[in-house]
Amino acid sequence: MSGSSPRLFLRHNALPLLAAAIFALMFGLYLALQPNGIRTDVLVTAANKGVLLALIASAQTLPVLTGGIDLSVGAIVVLCNCLASTLLSGTPTQIAFGVAATLCGGLAAGMVNALAVVVGRLQPIIATLATSTMFYGVSLLLRPNPGGDIDDDFASALTGAVGGVPVSLLLLLAIVLLLWLPFRRSLTGRGLYAVGSSEASAYMSGVKVARAKACAYVGAGLLSGFAGLLLTLVAESAQASAIQAGDLTLNSIAAVVIGGTSLFGGVGGIVGSILGAFILRTIGDLLFVLSAPPLWQPMFQGLILLGAVSFSALPTLRARNRLETYR
């Protein structure tokens, strides 16, 4: 039994481990080619961009694990960005209220998605496409013109470094350890995987399918709220941009797939999606230091996404029975 455990671990974590190796190689190459050398400000900038996409990819992971998808995560990030840009100033108490209100805004948006998918029984791709338009409309009401009033000290504290370590990375680690891992081990967390593997079998086994799905979309809203908050602190402004919302959503799906989470549901996790997000961000940084034309970045991202999707689909294509994929 002990001999099979390492093989079982490698089998179920092959794609995340591969993603970690690819990221280490790419980021090492980026640091080697970086003209400014390995400096704290270089690491902080790279970390802030990577953590932002990692949070959005983590949000996307939860619905994908159930076999669904959330096309509104980018719009929720923009919504929370616009909300935070009006609240993150003043006294410490007012700033704390702004942070709480921003996260509650993400939760509320996630609840809307959960109601549409679970109670309304709409297809996730249709429901979240519709709600993304709603959230974008609210963003325009909150921030009809680009701008914002952000407390500089608060923004610098959460987007800087402590002892040479970017604070954003510490916050991401805290979210993984304090939110994801306990949830992953809970009955509802295990229910996400069961529903994604086979919803009918999960229901027959006593899994509360509706609760698992609802938690997935509410959790996606909360993580998107964290991303919107970080975006506000990094940019110190906000803009209700439909293009930005669409780009964030598409990149989150790409990061999820690159990190080893199956779009069929039931396989993967947030850790792999985080690695996938950092890989995507490092591609852009590498192209920049290599002085490649900016238009090449979407092409490389598309090629990597295509390769990741093809690689992740191999077990399903080779299996005669799809259930063999989850053994």
Image (cartoon, helix red, strand yellow):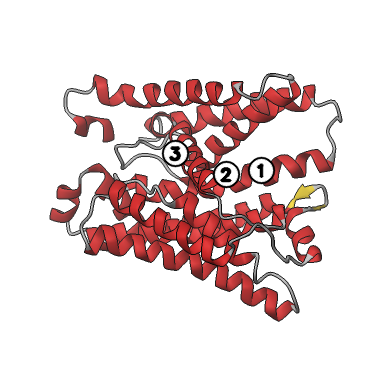
- SS label for mark 2: helix
Q: Amino acid at mark 1?
A: Lys
10 Å crowding of disc 1: few (<14), some (14-19), many (20+): some
Cα separation, mark 1 vs mark 3, equals 16 Å
Looking at the picture, tell me which residue is in the foreground, 172 or 72. Answer: 72
Q: Do tag 2 and tag 1 residues touch (Cβ < 8 Å)?
A: yes
Per the image, the residue denoted by label 1 is 49
The residue shown at (40%, 62%) is 110
Q: Do tag 1 and tag 3 residues touch (Cβ < 8 Å)?
A: no
Can residue 273 be seen from the camera position used here?
Answer: yes
Residue 205: quadrant of the picture:
bottom left
Q: Amino acid at mark 3?
A: Ile
Which image quadrant: the N terminus? Answer: top left
The residue shown at (80%, 26%) is 34
Q: Which one is earlier in the sequence, the residue at label 1 or at label 3?
A: 1
Per the image, the residue denoted by label 3 is 253
Q: Which one is earlier in the sequence, the residue at label 2 or at label 3?
A: 2
